[in-house]
Image (cartoon, rainbow, N blue to C red):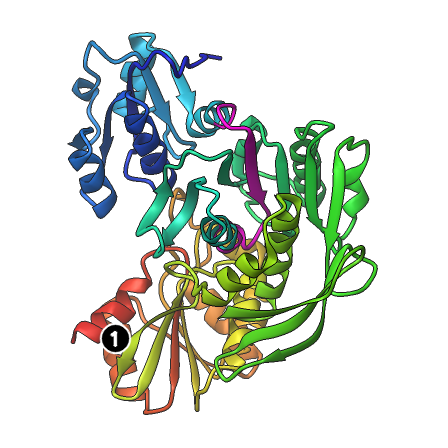
């Protein structure tokens, strides 16, 4: 594998530089004196920011974008061998790294690299941790998979000891990392276009945990089924969190305010009890907060900073994000695209004031939709009314013989009112005539479903 020397900057080209993670890495390298270029399909706020910082951005991916002075090419798992820039890189034998390999090498430059993993909750927990470190004055470097309003972006370049990043299991990318502290929030079946089954996924998380050095620490959800598969042979310190007293961190006296945000008493197995108030809704965020608190304790952060940061944190973009109110209907957007995430979001919405709860859902990828068809139907049935958009294919081309109409039939079999429209324009027209004052409308999915709520609010 190509090894970067961060003391001797070179010219690095990113294929797909506009991605949330790729753009962040590019920004860090620019700050370290590297020459950066990259390509993407279209302009965005992220590519425009990089351009202002000195990166050379190409729109459209062509072989001629790879100038003769490029020393290294970085690409993601979404790039296929027939990509013209990737093919040119191979033909010219330009050294390359995957996004994960670059991120892993970057982590080695920090005294306390922290990797936050799990099937769900990575972006929210990374953001919670970021808010705590910022509140405590730790001056961290942050790489977040979403836009955090506090830093007005997804990346922050600091000069402290801590480097914080999300660690995604898809294609085993997190196995290229070098963390000192690792978090595992939860482990469930997902990304079954890559993993064989839950046992394959558990094995990958075991390999991730095994990356931690003996003097490192693993903070893990103690309620993960078959957790011992992950922990077997792990040499580092292990800290658990969960809902009962068998764990190192657990909550008591949980209650919710008028917008579904939890208040609870934090109980440490070997320490004082503390009161916590969250600024984000849902029980799932109690778990996320417990993980963030355990990390803060590990870093010896003063607890008033933790309390303040968690109470002020209002989430990242597309995580139960308030978009606006139209004719008395509150519009929320959420990134949930797995049945567990949908269940968590819709349960959180039950504690949010509303008359009728509308969920406008865009399934994400054919493989995930087919694998969890019945689970999606059960999760979506927690809303009063469901509106389905077409499946967002992302990286996939084979529809596997299914569509959103297949999911509609599953929901109707459960007795749920479910509507399907093939275009966003038709969905918007239906919602305008159907939603009433006092209703709560959630646009949900990992694709471009957010555009529906934004279009409604723009009128």
Question: In the visual, does 457 lie left or right of 439?
Answer: left
Residue at the spot 50% in from the left edge and 26% down from the top edge: 104
Where is residue 387? Give x, y as percent: 39, 75
Which of the pair 130/242 is nearer the observer? 130
Which of the pair 452/288 is nearer the observer? 288
Q: Quadrant of residue 94?
A: top left
Where is residue 262? Give x, y as percent: 58, 74
Residue identified by numbered label 1: 428
Q: Which residues are magenta?
A: 107-126
For residue 280, say whether it is visible: yes
Q: How many numbered tags mark residues here?
A: 1
Residue at the spot 70% in from the left edge and 48% down from the top edge: 220
Q: Secondary structure at mark 1?
A: helix
Q: Is residue 110 above or below residue 442?
A: above
Where is residue 297? Give x, y as percent: 65, 49
Which of the pair 332/179 is nearer the observer? 179
Question: In the visual, does 160 lie left or right of 149?
Answer: right
Residue at the spot 63% in from the left edge and 80% down from the top edge: 255
Q: Is residue 131 above or below residue 44?
A: below
In the picture, the quarter occupied by the C terminus is bottom left
Question: In the visual, does 335 lie left or right of 249?
Answer: left
Q: Is residue 187 above or below residue 459?
A: above
Please say whether residue 288 is one of the residues in the magenta stretch: no
Where is residue 329? Give x, y as percent: 32, 85
Q: Is residue 96 above or below residue 252?
A: above
């Amino acid at each position: 594998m190509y090894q970067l020397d961060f003391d001797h900057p070179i010219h690095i080209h990113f294929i797909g530089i506009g991605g949330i993670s790729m753009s962040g890495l590019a920004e860090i390298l620019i700050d370290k004196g590297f020459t950066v270029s990259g390509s993407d399909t279209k302009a965005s706020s992220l590519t425009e920011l990089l351009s202002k910082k000195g990166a050379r951005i190409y729109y459209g991916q062509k072989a001629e974008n790879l100038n003769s002075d490029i020393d290294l090419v970085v690409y993601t798992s979404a790039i296929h061998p027939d990509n013209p820039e990737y093919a040119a890189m191979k033909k010219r034998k330009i050294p390359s790294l995957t996004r994960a390999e670059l991120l892993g090498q970057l982590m080695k430059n920090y005294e306390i690299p922290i990797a936050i993993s799990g099937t769900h909750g990575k972006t929210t927990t990374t953001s919670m941790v970021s808010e705590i470190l910022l509140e405590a004055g730790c001056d961290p470097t942050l790489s977040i998979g979403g836009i955090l309003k506090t830093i007005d972006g997804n990346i922050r370049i600091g000069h402290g000891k801590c480097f914080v990043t999300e660690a995604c299991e898809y294609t085993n990318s997190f196995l290229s990392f070098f963390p000192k502290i690792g978090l595992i929030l939860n482990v469930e079946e997902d990304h079954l276009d890559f993993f064989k089954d839950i046992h394959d996924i558990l094995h990958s998380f075991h390999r991730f945990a095994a990356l931690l050095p003996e003097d490192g620490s693993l903070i893990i959800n103690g309620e993960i089924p078959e957790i011992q598969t992950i922990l077997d042979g792990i040499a580092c310190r292990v800290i658990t969190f969960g809902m009962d007293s068998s764990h190192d961190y657990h909550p008591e006296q949980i209650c919710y305010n008028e917008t579904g945000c939890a208040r609870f008493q934090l109980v440490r197995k070997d320490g004082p009890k503390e009161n916590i108030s969250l600024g984000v809704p849902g029980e799932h965020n109690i778990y996320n907060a417990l993980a963030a608190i355990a990390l803060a304790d590990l870093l010896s952060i003063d607890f008033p900073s933790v309390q303040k940061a968690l109470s002020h944190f209002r989430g990242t973009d597309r995580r139960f994000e308030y978009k606006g109110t139209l004719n008395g209907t509150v519009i929320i957007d959420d990134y949930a695209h797995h049945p567990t995430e949908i269940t968590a979001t819709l349960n959180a919405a039950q504690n949010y004031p509303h008359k009728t709860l509308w969920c406008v859902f865009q399934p994400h990828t054919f493989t995930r939709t087919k694998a969890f068809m019945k689970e999606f139907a059960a999760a979506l049935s927690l809303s009063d009314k469901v509106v389905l958009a077409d499946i967002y294919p992302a990286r996939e081309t084979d529809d596997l013989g299914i569509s959103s109409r297949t999911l509609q039939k599953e929901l109707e079999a459960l007795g749920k009112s479910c509507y399907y429209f093939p275009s966003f324009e038709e969905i918007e027209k239906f919602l305008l005539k159907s939603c009433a004052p006092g209703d709560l409308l959630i646009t949900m999915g990992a694709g471009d479903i957010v555009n529906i709520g934004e279009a409604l609010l723009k009128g």
